Every structure is written in structure tokens, then in C-alpha cells.
Image (cartoon, helix red, strand yellow):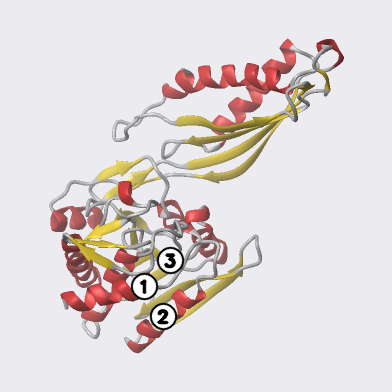
Amino acid sequence: MSSGLVTLLRELVAIDSTSTRTNLPFIDVLEQRLTALGFSCEQQRYRDDAGVEKANLLARVGDGTPELSLVGHTDCVPFDPAWTEALSLTARDGKLYGRGSCDTKAFIACALQAAAQTRGRLTRPFQLVFTADEELGCVGAKKLVEGGKGHTKRAIIGEPTSLRPIRANKGYCLAEIDVLGKEGHSAYPDTGASAIFRGARLLTKLEAYARGALREETHPDFVPGFGTLNVGMAVGGKAKNVIPGHMKLTLEWRPLPGQATEKVLRKVEALIAECQAEEPGFVATIRPLRMDRGFDTTPGADVVAFLAQQSGRAADTVSFGTEGPQLAALGAVPVVFGPGDITVAHQTGEFVPEDELHRAAEILEAAVLHFCA
């Protein structure tokens, strides 16, 4: 059993499912395995913004709304070509190295193992859901919501949590701010208006808001316990001797669960209005790109309590985004769980501890039997 699980993970890691590529070869492997186990499978296909065909896979046994769904994303972040073992699972010192080994192909391998081990033993409906483009903004999960597919009562969502159940995460929002000025020769500053100077005045207000009023609403279970705001990129100007006519700011914020995603957006619009009142020629606009809410499952929810008991690790929260909000929108009580450590994901040398891989498979099998048998 154990060696078979590692062999399965090796097969999955060998498939390059970088988000820029189609995930259909990966989906086809999963569907073939699940069809052989007696699951009814459905692909939800779409094309991404670059025209690349992608698919979500839904596989289920039993009739009615599934009591439990195991949910994993099939895509991975890119890897450095110099990492020669990225697509070749390599065992070393109790760790299994390879791109996606912990984020989240280890979870997917464990989910498939749980499906195989519980075959023929279930009396209530059970579902597996494998999504595309989580790394690009939970796009596949949002397609499920748009299509009304994947409804379930409970969802265990695979992410590297070191086998700790994660019952809540903050939201994730992204926007671009365009600040306009007027180009001119830098030797004659009054002939133009610097978009960068204007942007700097807006940035000062944004920083004051991020360090002040935004921190007034708190949630005791998060670290930090308040919504956060960051300007990650600021780009503008054409040359050292040209008054800049344009500046672009990339802004992201992470609202607390239950906090309106539009809260920061409305505040930024108000700060732009303040700048305009102070300088009538000031021009800036904000364009939201992503407005994802968080989720907050109660610690006493049965699926959270079950995973905490099985893993021996108390439920926790995280400040990064997951597919939890989308599964909640599909009727699920969501919890995030899986082998591996998020701090080693997205980097050269990503790995999953082999003992965690096997323990995760045991826990998922127990969960399937507990809720569906």
C-alpha cells in the first residue's frame, strides 16, 4: 500500500501541469483511474484567457448530494529549468521532492488512494473534485460555482497544512490604480504635472489607512488579526528627464471573513476624492481585478472536529487564500487539510515528508468511511 502511494505520486508529479499549460493530460489520468473504480465522471471544460483548454473533473458514487467531497487543484506554479528533478519524484532523507509534490499532488494521490480503499464500502454519496487554475486565482473553482457544479455537504480541500485542519481563511482582492499626470520637459516643471508625485500623495494616504483605520476591525483567530493592504508594484515614467504622465499602482488587500470585499475599494475611491479636492487637476481611477471573500467554518463543525481528532492537531486559520469560499458557495462546510508545509511550496526543492503522505491517506480514508459509509 505504501509503496503504491509513492508510485502514484511519482506518476502525478511526472505530468507537467504548470498553470500556463493545459491540464487535460492530468485530468485524463485521474478520470481513467476513477472510472475503473466505478465513479461516474464529468469534465467541465473551458478556455483560459490565453485560449488554453482546461478542465475541472467531478467524480462521484451514489445518488443525491454528496456527504463529503475531497477537492484538489491540479495546476502547479512554474519551476526553474535548472531543477532537473522537478518532474521526477526523488526520495531523500524521508522527503519526496518534485514540483507539486506537496502543492497539491500529494493530497490528490491520497484522495485517489482513499477512493480505492473505500471502494464498495460506501452507503452514502461521495465525490472527488479536481480543479484547474487555482494558482491563477481559483479560476476553476469559480467555474464550478458559475456552472452550479460540485454541490456537497462537506468539503476537505487539499493544501499543504502539515496535517492541521484549517477552518478559515481571509479573502483576497486585487486592483490596479491608474494615476494620470501631464508629460513635459523636466527642466520646466510647471509645463506638466507629475503622475509619480501625485501617486506618492495617494500612497501616503493608503499607508495611513492600512496602518490605522483598517486595523480597527479584528478577528481573534487570525495572525495578523486584521485585514491587510499592500501596494506590491508601482510603475511609472518614461525617462529621467520627462515629467511622468502616468503611474500604475498594483494594490492587494485581504479582508477578514465576513468583511465586505468592497470595503477597501470604497475607501480607496474616497482617498482619491480627497486628493482631487486638494488638487483639482488630480486624476486617478481604480479597477478591481479580483474580489474573493474568505470563509469561516466554526471549530465545532463535524468535519473540522473529525480531522482535528484524527490528526491530533487543533484547527487553525490562515491569511492566504484557498478554494474554501467557492466550496462554501456550493453548499459545503469547508475545511482545508493536507500533507506538506506551505512554506516549502512554490520553490525549487519543494517536497512532502513521506510519513505525512501516508498519514494523510489514512486520515482521508477514515473521513470517507466516517461520513459516507
Sequence-wise first label, 1 or 2 = 1
Q: Tag 1, which secondary structure?
A: helix
Which residue corresponds to the image point at 43% horizontal and 44% vertical from the top-left?
294
Q: Which mark is residue 74?
A: 3
Q: Which mark is residue 318?
A: none
Of residues 241 and 287, which is closer to you in this image?
Answer: 241
Pointer 1 local density, CA inside 10 Å: few below 14, some 14–19, many at least 20: many
The reply, left or right, for residue 240 in relation to residue 258 is right
**Alpha carbons under labels 1 and 2: distance apart:** 8 Å
Q: CA distance from mark 3 to mark 1?
A: 9 Å
Upstream in sequence: badge 3 or badge 1 = 1
Which is in the foreground here, disc 1 or disc 2?
Answer: 1
The one of 350 and 271 positioned closer to us in this rendering: 350
Callout 1, which amino acid? Leu
Q: In the structure shown, which secondary structural element does the residue marked by tag 3 occupy?
A: loop
Classify residue 12 by image quadrant: bottom left
> Decide: marks 3, 1 in contact (CB < 8 A)?
no
> Which residue is at the front of the view, 173 or 348?
348
Residue 196: percent from left, percent from top: 69, 22
Find out whether the residues at labels 1 and 2 contact each other: C-beta distance under 8 Å.
Answer: yes
Q: Which residue is mark 1?
A: 12
What's the CA distance linking mark 3 and mark 2? 11 Å
Q: Position of residue 136 (x, y in %)?
A: 52, 54
- Please name the residue shown 84% across and 11% down the image: 190
Q: Amino acid at mark 3?
A: Thr
Disc ID at residue 29: 2
Q: Is residue 18 above or below residue 200?
A: below
Q: Residues within 10 Å of mark 2 (few under 14, many from 20)?
A: few
